[in-house]
Image: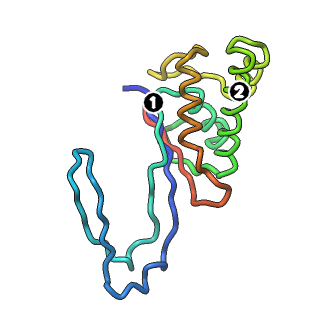
Amino acid sequence: MGLDMYLERETYIGGQYHQDTSGVINIKFTDFGGKEKSFNIDPSKVTSINQSVGSWRKANSIHNFFVQKAQGGRDECQRTYVPNDLLIELRDTCKKILSARKEFGKNAPVTQRLIEANLMPTGGFFFGSTEIDDWYFEDLENTLDILKDVKADEGDYYYQSSW
């Protein structure tokens, strides 16, 4: 129970595989138990592919960023389109805060101003701590890892939370 957050990329492919003469696309994967599985898809029925990009748990400052900047302040666990430039903004903001922490310390005025202006923790039902502590900075590091490959023109991104 608590704040769970998900980011996925949806890539439109409608029509790309319709010329496939075999009539099927075979998808192979390994499930969570390590067992290899496969199934066939009729390419004429595929319009897009959804791919998990990353997830967070109780990273309430990141959640607040999405709520304020992508969801218009409305926090109803809705699936929300997130423009790529907003993800790049979040990535760059995390970099700035982490750099300031490294150079000046987590309690330095410059670090605190960056946090207050950009990524303040927010409270909520089982949202986790609102302290700016090591867990907070670990959430920023995790966010950098999730967003490291985001490019300006690569697919459509969607954010959704659950609590």
Q: x%, y% of residue 113?
A: 77, 20
Residue 99 figure quarter: top right
93 on left or right of 71? right
Is residue 43 depicted above or below 120 in this figure? Answer: below
- Secondary structure at numbered mark 2: helix
Is residue 26 depicted above or below 23 in this figure? Answer: above
Q: x%, y% of residue 66?
A: 61, 38
Callout 2: few (<14), some (14-19), or many (20+) C-alpha neighbours within 10 Å?
Answer: some
Farthest front residue?
Answer: 103
Which residue lies at the image location 27% right of the left edge and 53% below the top edge? 30
Of circles 1 and 2, which is in front?
2
Give the residue type at disc 1: Arg
- Secondary structure at numbered mark 1: strand
Q: x%, y% of residue 135?
A: 52, 19
Give the residue type at disc 2: Ser
Callout 1: few (<14), some (14-19), or many (20+) C-alpha neighbours within 10 Å?
Answer: some
117 on left or right of 130? right
Is residue 130 depicted above or below 40 in this figure? Answer: above
Residue 101 figure quarter: top right
- Distance Cα–Cα, label 1 vs label 2: 23 Å
137 on left or right of 25? right
86 on left or right of 135? right
The first of marks 1 and 2 along the sequence is: 1
Residue matched to label 2 = 99
Is residue 18 depicted above or below 83 in this figure? Answer: below
Residue matched to label 1 = 57
Image quadrant in which the C terminus is located: top left
Comparing 85 with 63, the one in front is 85
Which residue lies at the image location 55% right of the left edge and 26% below the top edge? 60
